[in-house]
Amino acid sequence: MKIGIGYDAHRLVDGRRLFLGGIHVPYGKGLLGHSDGDVLIHAICDAILGAISEGDIGVHFPDSDESIKNIESVKILAYVSELAKRKGYRIINIDAVVIAEEPKISPYREKMKERLAEVLGIDAALVGIKGKTTEGMGFIGRKEGIEVQAVALLEIEQ
């Protein structure tokens, strides 16, 4: 068994759609990034990449590469999932914490779990997503951004 930890944070800005967990979440702002800014997927990708000793998203999808500007993060997740499979790994489970004052995560949790599970090729019961706030503290509390922490547990298939 191998475990990986992932983290990501992006600034909320006007003029972009908000994507979290591979779905569009209706909100007045979106996340700034080279891709669609889906911090939940980015943290999960880094957790998986860490577990399989393959660096982080920036190694595989550098923000200096204009050919992938505005890439959908589900494509990044599909690549990472396939890389793990090619290296002989199977995902045991994913657990993530989305830290944001707004929007609330609970109305979208099940759709996120289903979408992530679909892309990863696993059962939705193996994906945990929790929403937390910082009770008004810091950049999250000021509604300037969203951050995510994620853990991935994988095993080598025999």
Image (cartoon, rainbow, N blue to C red):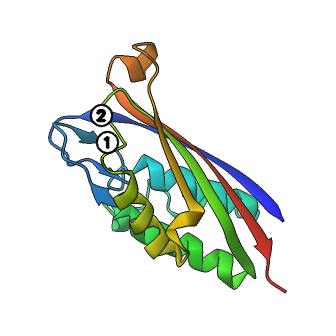
- SS at mark 1? loop
Q: Is residue 58 left or right of residue 156?
A: left
How many C-alpha atoms fall within 10 Å of the one at disc 2: few (<14), some, or many (≥20)?
Answer: many
**Element marked by disc 2:** strand
Closest to the observer, 58 or 156:
156
The percent coordinates of residue 94 (x first, y second) are 61, 58
Within 10 Å of the Cα at label 1, are there few (<14), some (14-19), or many (20+) other Cα atoms? Answer: many
Q: Is residue 94 left or right of residue 12?
A: right
Q: 53 or 85, which lies in front?
A: 85
In the rendered image, the vertical position of residue 62 relative to residue 142, given as above or below: below
Task: Look at 30% across and 46% down and name the residue there.
Answer: 107
Q: Residue at x 67, y 75 (%)?
A: 84
Q: In the rendered image, which residue does mark 1 sit on?
A: 32
Q: In screen coordinates, is 125 left or right of 48?
A: left
Q: Name the N-terminal-most of marks 2 and 1.
A: 2
Residue 12 is labelled as 2
Q: Amino acid at mark 2?
A: Leu
Marks 2 and 1: CB-CB under 8 Å? Answer: yes
Q: Quadrant of the C terminus?
A: bottom right
**Residue at the location (75% across, 82% down)?**
88
**Residue 103 appears anywhere in the view:** yes
The amino acid pointed to by label 1 is Leu
